[in-house]
Amino acid sequence: MRDLLLGRVPKDFDIGTDAAPQAVRKLFRNCRLIGRRFRLAHILFAGGKVVEVATFRRRPEPLDPEAPELLMTSDNVFGTAREDALRRDFTINGLFYNIADFSVIDYVGGLEDLDAGVIRTIGDPDIRFREDPVRMMRAVEFASRLGFAITPDTYEAILDHRKEIAKSAPPRVTEEISQSLRGGHALPTFLLMREVGLLDVLLPELARVLREIDPDHPQGTGHLFWSLLDVLDAERRRGRPYDDAVLFSLFFLPVVRSRLRDLELADPEPGRLVPILEDIVTPVSIRMSLPNAVSQRIKQALATVGRLSHRPDDRVVTRRLAFREAFPAALDLFELNAMATGRGEELVREWRTLEERVKTARKRFPAATPQPAARRRRRRGGRRRG
């Protein structure tokens, strides 16, 4: 409803009902129930279309605002439509559309806040953010995506409770970060995250570099990071897809460059670079619960991207570089850097030409594609004696 009323195209439609999940399942043969703690009904249609149906819920029990810990661990108690609206995060997300009479049902003042262009929590923001700290990230993301202002009480509550975000489940936090990177509004989102202090808690390594390393210098690490996000937003709004390794590498790139500067390593050999990347990327990947495959591609892309600053040639080592699994991610990262700095765009075109030649070779001669070396199996019982 929020997006429709703002003249935007919704990415999907969610249905709310007073029917319990099992009742929905009886009505639709093409229904599948998912979730344990929070049961949802997915109605499956041809072509992979899925309509999500949720039973109205209410807050599990009255909460004591003076309690030291309000973090919600249960949210699966059925309720009425009004109770369901009151348990949602922001007023602009608490609107219902009644298909019986084509009316908008507003229990929380969402229509007024949509007109005013503000992000306001439903209820006391101090309590709502302590219940679910990820709501602070969502407030920043909605404000940045819609161009809305965060109400003063909500803004102050984020400042007061920003450290609570560390209590949230890492996969949820990482998913919110990923959505911001993919949504075409990464730059305003992370600028606002830095402003309210969330970036210091979520990515302290990056926040420290952006704060300490020439943040205002046109060619400095801090300035480059924001330029990269600006370019990324423009490309995403044009619909260009990016691998997760490329998106998350943007956070590590300033940290790696800062470390190399401290070590006075302008163009390190791969042997020197690998342990540095391991030391920087691995702890953060674990903290963010990034899949191991993504973490490995991030390290490989960062290890490769520096080698693309040289013009490609016909040497075997260059062709091997282009055949590497992380080469596409490294080239995307190199291209974003070239677009952000205005330098190296000719090199990007030459490497893209080589990439197309490699793709053609893979299709025509799949057997010639380099394969990872097979691990030798150790013979049981040791070496056979003659």
Image: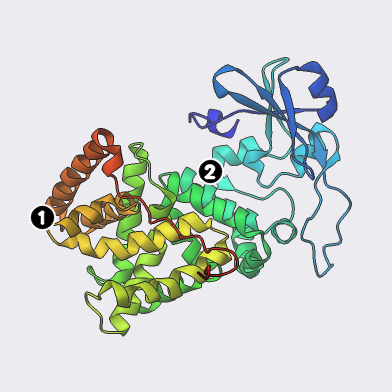
Give the camera-side residue of 381 and 203.
381
First in sequence: mark 2 or mark 1? 2
In this image, 78 relative to 310: left or right? right
| Mark 1: amino acid | Asp
Query: Which residue lies at the image location 45% right of the left edge and 68% below the top edge?
Result: 281
Q: Whole-percent x and y of residue 266?
A: 22, 77
Query: Which residue lies at the image location 30% right of the left edge and 84% below the top edge?
Result: 263
Q: Are marks 2 and 1 in contact (CB under 8 Å)?
A: no
Whether 70 is drawn above or below 87: the answer is below
C-alpha gap between disc 2 and disc 1: 54 Å
- Neighbour tally class for label 2: few under 14, some 14-19, many 20 plus, Cα within 10 Å: some
Query: Which residue lies at the image location 26% right of the left edge and 43% below the top edge?
Result: 368
Give the camera-side residue of 376 and 81.
376
Given the current orientation, which residue lies at the most extreme right position? 61
| Marker disc for residue 117 | 2
Q: Secondary structure at mark 1?
A: loop
Q: Whole-percent x and y of residue 126?
A: 71, 61
In this image, 82 relative to 353: left or right? right
Viewport quadrant of the N terminus: top right
| Marker disc for residue 347 | none
Q: Taking the image as drawn, is residue 214 in sight?
A: no
| Mark 2: amino acid | Gly
What is the count of numbered marks? 2
Q: Whole-percent x and y of residue 83?
A: 82, 39
> Circle 1 sits on which residue?
313
- Neighbour tally class for label 1: few under 14, some 14-19, many 20 plus, Cα within 10 Å: few
